[in-house]
């Protein structure tokens, strides 16, 4: 096909000439592209005998000199960095004839860019040198690392104060059966008193990179679980910290309370006994399962993605397992070695 312009000096007219037996053609070798783990480039092979234009979202650019030529041509596209707040984004690349009158329809390619795996420090960044787990010192080190999140464990005292500790007891004191006054003189190995959740929120609000991943521990009674859910949500609300907090728990009662009382909460389940479709039907944001559970149910991560859920794995500490779960496609890895994982991901990309 060719376009000939005829002019008599006063005016001009364009005439389209089609070679006999040669139909206008515009095809692309893929109808969809998925980019994993922060990949920033992809290629498409276009076959055409007509001139076309390319329409792109603002975050995709056409790379290099791609002057149109008849036949097959490979086009390279680059993507801007995925924003920290997004786990994925979607767009459309459209190839359209320059001359719409020839009757060739535009060709669209659906694009999905998935974010690379994010780092969550397990009970703060407490290793090398060793700080107490669930301490303000280990939390601050995680914040300084500027990773996705720092996980911490919370309990509620019998007078309504939410404090950090992994176990139900500290220095022989049962936390949920004791007042805060009975706990405040307990000292961690670095001399800190037992931290409160309010102190942690105060720290996280001074920066914008790293979230608190609040694990609400399974309490002895449903009454106490409901009390701690209400207290944690109120603390987060009072401090305007909803966007800086995710929630996890082994207790379905706690998770259901978080979801029911504030459907916007990002709530993930830890216990590993619910399939992704069940989590989706109950309003969860994601699954947060142990490495052994996800190795035994290797299809659950992709099932979670298909259902629009996030996938986290805990507690992963070796480079072999880092690579295993990155390849599996998890969104987050919770680790005792956040600096090592951060460096590994930087090299892996």
Image (spheres, grey):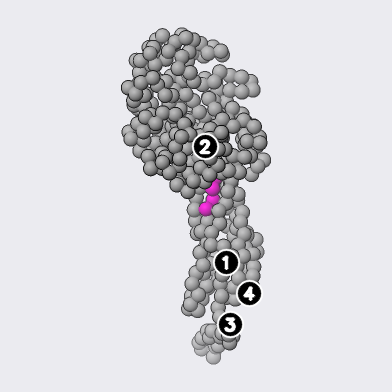
Q: CA distance from mark 4 to mark 2?
A: 47 Å
Identity of the residue drawn at 44% across and 37% down: 274
In 3D space, how far apart are the residues under numbered discs 4 and 3 (Cα atoms)? Answer: 13 Å
User: Residue beneath label 1, please?
Assistant: 28
Is 14 one of the magenta-colored residues? no
User: Quadrant of residue 1 in the image?
Assistant: bottom right
Q: Is residue 265 left or right of residue 80?
A: left
Which mark sits nearer the N-terminus, 2 or 3?
3
Residue that carries the numbered disc 2 in the rendered image: 312
Q: Is residue 259 among what the camera can see? A: yes
For marks 1 and 4, give the CA distance. Answer: 14 Å
Q: Earlier in the sequence, mark 4 or mark 3?
A: 3
On screen, residue 232 above or below 14: above
Secondary structure type for disc 3: loop
Mark number displayed over residue 22: 3
Q: Is residue 197 above or below residue 171?
A: below
Q: Earlier in the sequence, mark 3 or mark 1?
A: 3
What label sits on residue 70 in the rendered view?
A: 4
Whole-percent x, y for residue 178 in the image: 39, 12
* Mark sitting earlier along the chain (4/2): 4
Q: Nearer the viewer, mark 4 or mark 2?
A: 2
């Amino acid at each position: 096909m060719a376009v000939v312009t005829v002019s008599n000096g006063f005016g001009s007219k364009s005439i389209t000439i089609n070679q006999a037996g040669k139909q206008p053609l515009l095809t692309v070798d893929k109808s969809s592209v998925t980019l994993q783990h922060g990949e920033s480039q992809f290629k498409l092979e276009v076959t055409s005998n007509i001139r076309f234009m390319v329409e792109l979202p603002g975050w995709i650019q056409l790379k290099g000199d791609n002057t149109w030529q008849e036949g097959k041509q490979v086009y390279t596209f680059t993507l801007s960095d995925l924003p920290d707040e997004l786990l994925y984004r979607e767009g459309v690349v459209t190839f359209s004839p320059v001359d719409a009158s020839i009757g060739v329809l535009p060709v669209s390619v659906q694009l999905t860019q998935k974010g690379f795996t994010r780092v969550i420090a397990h009970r703060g960044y407490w290793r090398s040198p060793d700080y107490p787990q669930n301490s303000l010192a280990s939390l601050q080190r995680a914040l300084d690392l500027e990773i996705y999140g720092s996980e911490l464990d919370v309990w509620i005292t019998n007078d309504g104060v939410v404090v950090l500790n992994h176990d139900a007891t500290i220095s022989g004191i049962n936390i949920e059966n004791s007042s805060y006054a009975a706990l405040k003189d307990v000292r961690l190995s670095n001399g800190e008193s037992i931290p409160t959740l309010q102190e942690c929120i105060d720290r996280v609000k001074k920066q914008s990179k790293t979230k608190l991943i609040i694990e609400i521990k399974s309490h002895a009674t449903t009454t106490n679980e409901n009390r701690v859910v209400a207290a944690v949500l109120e603390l987060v609300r009072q401090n305007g910290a909803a966007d800086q907090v995710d929630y996890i728990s082994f207790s379905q009662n706690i998770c259901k309370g978080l979801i029911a009382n504030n459907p916007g909460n990002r709530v993930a389940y830890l216990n590993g006994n619910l399939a992704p479709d069940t989590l989706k039907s109950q309003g969860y944001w994601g699954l947060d399962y142990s490495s052994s559970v996800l190795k035994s149910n290797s299809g659950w991560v992709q099932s979670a993605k298909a259902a629009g859920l996030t996938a986290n794995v805990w507690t992963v500490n070796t480079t072999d397992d880092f690579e295993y779960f990155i390849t599996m496609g998890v969104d987050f890895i919770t680790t005792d070695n956040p600096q090592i994982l951060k460096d590994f991901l930087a090299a892996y990309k």
